[in-house]
Image: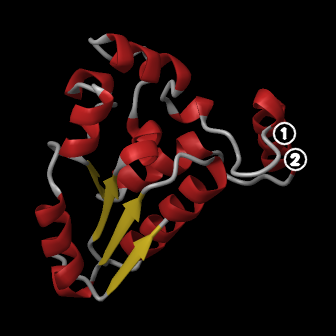
Amino acid sequence: MNDAADGVTIIVFSGDMDKAMAAFNIAIGAAALGKEASMFFTFWGIKAIQKGNLTGDSFFGRMMGLLNRGGIERIGPSRFNFWGMGRWMFKQMLKMHEITPLTELRQTAMDLGVKLLPCQMSMEVMEIKKENLIDGVQPACGVATMLEMAYRSKASFFI
């Protein structure tokens, strides 16, 4: 059993490809070293653990679901996205340089036991239901749960 006091907590706030890659790489590195790693996905970061289907019940929720459609394949870079062209270009560059794609990074993190925790408040505000998330994520939790993990961890990151 890993000692939680020797682990890492990563708050994934950004829904950008490059930032999500950094977050998953840090989590994978910690897990590979035998450390407990937890990732708390809030607001735009939840895109990395969504299935990609449309979300929302209310008018505003459906608009948010349409404009900010989740799913790891839809995540674009933080700069030079150019209406999706940047996402395509970066994926090609990653492939050319034999860099592990984001979908595989996420799966590797899960295979290594990294805990993926969605933010309850963000899910409520953005009208994202548990069934809109990929299999294998932990139950939604609040900031108090994330803070307890962060207090016990030796390292915390906000990405």
Q: Residue 119 versus residue 134: which sits nearer the camera?
A: 119
Residue for badge 1: 92
Left or right position of 57 against 28: left
Residue 145: % across, % down:
12, 63
Residue 118 to residue 28: above or below: above
Specify the quadrant of the image occupied by residue 39: bottom left
Q: Answer few, some or many: residues within 10 Å of disc 1's Cα (few below 14, many 20 plus, some between 14 and 19).
A: few
Left or right position of 89 against 152: right
Residue at image location 14% in from the left, 50% down from the top = 141
Please, what secondary structure does the residue beneath circle 2 have? helix
Residue for badge 2: 96
Query: The residue under label 1 is which amino acid type?
Result: Gln
Residue 97 to residue 4: above or below: above
Left or right position of 138 against 95: left
Residue at image location 19% in from the left, 43% down from the top = 120
- Contact check, label 2 and label 1, Cβ < 8 Å: yes
Q: Answer few, some or many: residues within 10 Å of disc 2's Cα (few below 14, many 20 plus, some between 14 and 19).
A: few
Residue at image location 83% in from the left, 31% down from the top = 85
Query: The residue under label 2 is which amino acid type?
Result: Met
User: How far is disc 2 from disc 1 in space, using C-alphas?
Assistant: 6 Å
Q: Residue 119 versus residue 106: which sits nearer the camera?
A: 119
